[in-house]
Image (cartoon, rainbow, N blue to C red):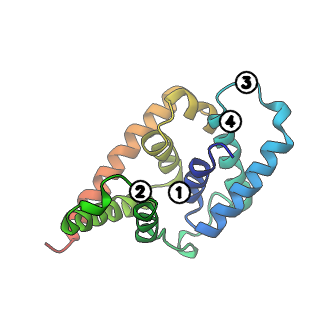
Amino acid sequence: MPHLDAAYNLARWLVRNNDDAQEAVQEAYLRAFRFFDSFRGEDGKAWLFAIVRNTCFTLHGRNRDAGLHETFDEQLHAQETVAAGSAGSYCRDPADIALEHADRELVNRAIEALPVAFREVLVMREIEDLSYKEIARIVDIPLGTVMSRLARGRQMLHEVLATQMKGSPK
């Protein structure tokens, strides 16, 4: 199924819970199959992301309490990547791997702290590598708003990371 991993990744960032993300992606794919006749030949990934995004918000609500969600288990997913045979992973220094893991966890916590409007455009642009135009179509906002949210989201991410770095033990 095309774009399944990317759809799950977006859903995971939006609903902040693995089980809810799986449910949302499953429902989104069902909707995509059901309404495939509405697909007009544009970018399939962007079309699917719009369905995933809308499904997440429909099933789980925009204002759901973030305290009800479990945290993403980055260590488990990092181990799966290594087990799947990522290039060169077997000969890397364990200290480097641990440092990368700590950095990744820090960034993930910072992204989780962002309001959903900024988190979703940041994830779509920086993690899923969608264009501004695709993001505007998915979120159904003007291109200028996408750029504004990205700029503000990046600034907020910078501020959250700076705060986290000051509070972390050295």
Count up the numbered dots: 4
- The residue tagged 3 is 41
Q: CA distance from mark 4 to mark 3?
A: 9 Å
For marks 4 and 3, the one nearer the N-term is 3
Callout 2: SS: helix
Q: Nearer the viewer, mark 3 or mark 2?
A: 3
Q: CA distance from mark 3 to mark 2?
A: 32 Å
For marks 1 and 2, the one nearer the N-term is 1
Q: CA distance from mark 1 to mark 4?
A: 18 Å
Q: Residue at x 62, y 44 (%)?
A: 3
Residues tagged 1 and 2 counted as in contact (Cβ below 8 A)? yes
**Is 37 displayed left or right of 67 in the figure?**
right
Residues tagged 3 and 2 counted as in contact (Cβ below 8 A)? no
For marks 3 and 1, the one nearer the N-term is 1
For marks 1 and 4, the one nearer the N-term is 1
Q: CA distance from mark 4 to mark 2?
A: 24 Å
Kindly identify the amino acid type of the residue bearing the numbered disc 1.
Trp
Within 10 Å of the Cα at label 3, are there few (<14), some (14-19), or many (20+) other Cα atoms?
Answer: few
Q: Residue at x 31, y 65 (%)?
A: 101
Callout 1: SS: helix
Callout 4: SS: helix
Residue 41 drawn at (x, y percent): 73, 24
Q: CA distance from mark 3 to mark 1?
A: 27 Å
Residues tagged 3 and 1 counted as in contact (Cβ below 8 A)? no
Q: Residue 72 or 3: which is nearer the viewer?
A: 3
- The residue tagged 1 is 13
- The residue tagged 2 is 111
The dot on residue 47 is 4
Q: CA distance from mark 1 to mark 2?
A: 9 Å
Kindly identify the amino acid type of the residue bearing the numbered disc 3.
Gly
